[in-house]
Image (spheres, rainbow, N blue to C red):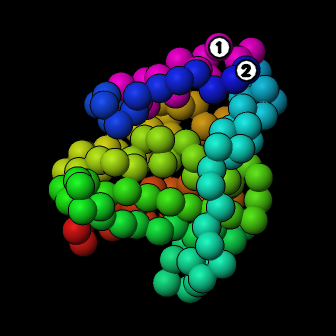
């Protein structure tokens, strides 16, 4: 399944989560859903070597994961995120989280319950405990950046 065009930066954060859930619902089993998450990674731009540093590294993930948070002059009230990992599945998870959280205000980001996102997308049955912990670590980092903004 090809990723459908979306306007996540123009829709509510809840609608973006619902859109992802609908996309997962179109796939008949978790093997295909995991393949779809990996496919999402194809659209993720890699970070520059200098951005793969300890300050950007997310602890609590099995794989190496980096997340960069930035504000842009043209939209100073919003946070934008970029990320990368050395694992294909994790890169897909990053792409999924960026779709939900990047380009949002800190208040929007903090309004989301990470466990509710996890439940709504049905990831509990698809990911190992270690992968689940890593995903929560990524969401915690994103919300930490929003609290600090």
Image location (x, y in percent) of residue 138? 51, 60
Label 1: element kind: loop
Image location (x, y in percent) of residue 142? 40, 60
Q: Is residue 61 visible?
A: no
**Residue at 67% from the left image edge and 53% from the top image edge:** 91
The residue furthest bottom is: 54
Q: Local crowd at mark 2 within 10 Å, few (<14), some, or many (≥20)?
A: few
> Could you tell which of marks 1 and 2 lies nearer the N-terminus?
2
**Depth order, front residue of 87/128:** 87
Contact (Cβ within 8 Å) of mark 1 with mark 2: yes
* Magenta stretch encompasses residue 148: no
Report how far apart the C-alphas of labels 1 and 2 lie in the structure.
9 Å
Q: Image height check: is 87 above or below 93?
A: below
| Mark identifier at residue 1 | 2
**Residue at 49% from the left image edge and 35% from the top image edge:** 119
Residue bearing mark 1: 26
Q: Which segment did they paint magenta?
A: 15-28
**Quadrant assignment, res 47:** bottom right
């Amino acid at each position: 399944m090809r990723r459908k065009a979306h306007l996540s930066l123009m829709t509510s954060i809840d609608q973006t989560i619902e859109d992802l859930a609908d996309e997962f619902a179109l796939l008949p089993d978790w093997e295909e859903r995991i393949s779809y998450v990996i496919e999402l990674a194809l659209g993720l731009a890699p970070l520059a070597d200098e951005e793969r540093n300890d300050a950007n590294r997310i602890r609590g993930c099995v794989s190496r994961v980096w997340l960069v948070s930035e504000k842009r002059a043209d939209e100073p009230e919003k946070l934008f995120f970029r990320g990368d990992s050395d694992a294909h599945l994790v890169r897909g998870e990053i792409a999924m989280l960026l779709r939900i959280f990047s380009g949002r205000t800190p208040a929007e980001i903090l309004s989301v319950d990470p466990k509710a996102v996890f439940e709504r997308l049905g990831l509990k049955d698809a990911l190992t405990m270690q992968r689940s912990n890593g995903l929560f670590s990524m969401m915690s980092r994103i919300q930490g950046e929003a609290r600090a903004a």
